[in-house]
Image (cartoon, rainbow, N blue to C red):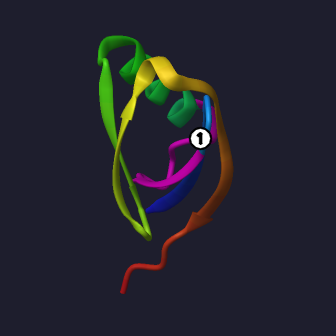
Amino acid sequence: MKEFTVCYTLDSDIKRGKLVKELNVKAEDVLQEILKHMERNEYFVVDSNEGSYIINAALVRYVRIVGEKELVCM
């Protein structure tokens, strides 16, 4: 599994979220999935280490994948 750290730049804030995907998924694919999800939904939930956030998609100005790491499963 891979864990992606996604940075959402809003009008007046920056939120970071974590997404866990399969090992063969690329960062570009995750970004496209996020953008399509934002296009279809007015609000979406972002999970992070600090908790969960409900974000209004209309307030998002920029989305970037800022980190990617492989998770070790035992």
Disc tally is 1
Q: Nearer the viewer, residue 60 or 36?
A: 60
Taking the magenta stretch, the answer to whether it contains residue 22 is: yes
Give neighbour class at mark 1: few <14, some 14-19, many 20+ (Cα, 10 Å). few
The residue beneath circle 1 is: 26
The furthest residue to the front:
12
Residue sitting at x 46%, y 17% = 58
Quarter of image, res 26: top right
| Secondary structure of the residue carrying numbered label 1 | loop
Q: Nearer the viewer, residue 49 or 71?
A: 49
Residue sitting at x 42%, y 23% = 57
Quarter of image, res 51: bottom left
Q: Amino acid at mark 1?
A: Lys
* 44 to 45, vertically: above or below: above
The furthest residue to the bottom:
74
Identify the magenta region.
Answer: 14-28
Q: Nearer the viewer, residue 66 or 74?
A: 66
* 56 to 40, vertically: above or below: below
Q: Quadrant of the N terminus?
A: bottom left
Relative image position of residue 62 (x, y in whole percent): 66, 28
Residue sitting at x 48%, y 55% = 23
In the image, is 47 to the left or to the right of 17?
Answer: left
Relative image position of residue 6 (x, y in whole percent): 57, 47
* 51 to 4, vertically: above or below: below
The furthest residue to the top:
39
Q: Quadrant of the C terminus?
A: bottom left
Taking the magenta stretch, the answer to whether it contains residue 25 is: yes
* 43 to 70, vertically: above or below: above
